[in-house]
Amino acid sequence: MSIEPGMLGAHLREHEVTPERAARVEEAGYGTLWLDGSPPADLALAERLLEATTRMVVATSVINAWTADADEVAASYHRITDRYPDRFLLGVGIGHREVHVEYASPYATLVSYLDELTTAGVPSEHIVVAALGPRMLRLARDRTAGTVPCLVTPEHTRGARTLLGPDPLLMPGHFAILDTDTERARTLARSGPPGTALQVVNYANNLRRLGFTDADLVGTGSDAVIDALAIHGDPATTAAGLIAHLDAGANHVGVYPLGNDPIDTLRTIAAAVFEARPGRPEYR
């Protein structure tokens, strides 16, 4: 694979990122900037972020198969990679039944979507799948460069590596909060995806496979599940939680920053990770 995502990724939503902020993320040593949510099929923001940076990969964590026309996505892919070869990675996924009224046959739908992208000339080695369960992980292994799971633990990463084998990219994302006040950090996590996504079937089923119980998933989650999904503490503690994914078999770990200043959080965490793993900043 010619795309090099690096050891660290930064996950940001459209309202959190600008070209100027992307440049600051790159300067901090991140190898990839992941666009979260469901970016539109024109991929215009990804192109602007590539223009503002020089080396960092820009990737979509989930181009949604229900909302983004595959032919338009493929045309956008070719437009971008003609200008920025080996710096754009297309992450695709199937969304959630709680959001999309048309949600049905998710596996078959995603297979068909990958078929359309392939027919339109998007190379499989430039695609990754947002996969959680065994069937989707096998699809990622067999049809794409790998997977970008969300709301997972190092235990999930270890099992995913076993299923994927040694070669596919495994690039989990983990929420991170720089706050040593445990209760305040948990409150923040519960107001974001670690708490609000627990009633989403895909995520809930995956957490049950990891050993969490229905009691852990009630409301915005038990302390145990919140602590597992959102690392919190000082920079060294947060860095150690992210590095646990690398030790479990990940090629790359993405950081979902929670807090008032996501860019400052990302920069502080990167410095702590690179201090714990000397010689590993992306561009040094």
Image (cartoon, helix red, strand yellow):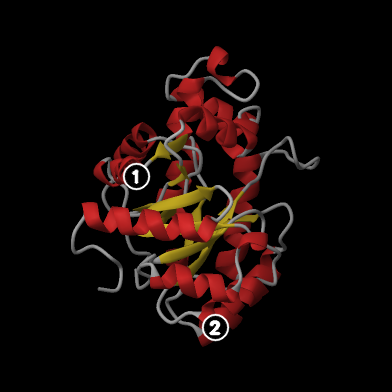
Please identify the residue farthest to the bottom as the structure is shown: 83
- The image's mark for residue 164 is 1
Q: Is residue 75 above or below residue 171?
A: below
Location of residue 124 in the rendering, given as x and y in whole percent from the top left corner: 46, 64
Location of residue 53 in the rendering, given as x and y in whole percent from the top left corner: 48, 79
Q: Is residue 114 above or below residue 173?
A: below
- The image's mark for residue 108 is none
Identified at 59% across, 55% down, the residue is 36
Left or right, residue 278 beside residue 98: left
Task: Give the image quarter of residue 95.
Answer: top right
The amino acid on which the numbered mark 1 sits, given as a three-letter code, is Leu
Assign the C terminus to one quadrant of the image: bottom left
In this view, the residue in front, 21 or 206, is 21
The amino acid on which the numbered mark 2 sits, given as a three-letter code, is Glu
Label 2: which secondary element = helix
Query: Looking at the image, is mark 1 or mark 2 earlier in the sequence?
Result: 2
Location of residue 134 in the rendering, given as x and y in whole percent from the top left corner: 45, 35
Name the residue beneath numbered marker 2.
51
**Can residue 72 be seen at all in this image of the molecule?**
yes
Identified at 53% across, 19% down, the residue is 222
Count of numbered circles in the view: 2
In this view, the residue in front, 127 or 24, is 24
Identified at 65% across, 76% down, the residue is 75
Assign the N terminus to one quadrant of the image: bottom left
In this view, the residue in front, 219 or 239, is 239
Left or right, residue 115 beside residue 131: right
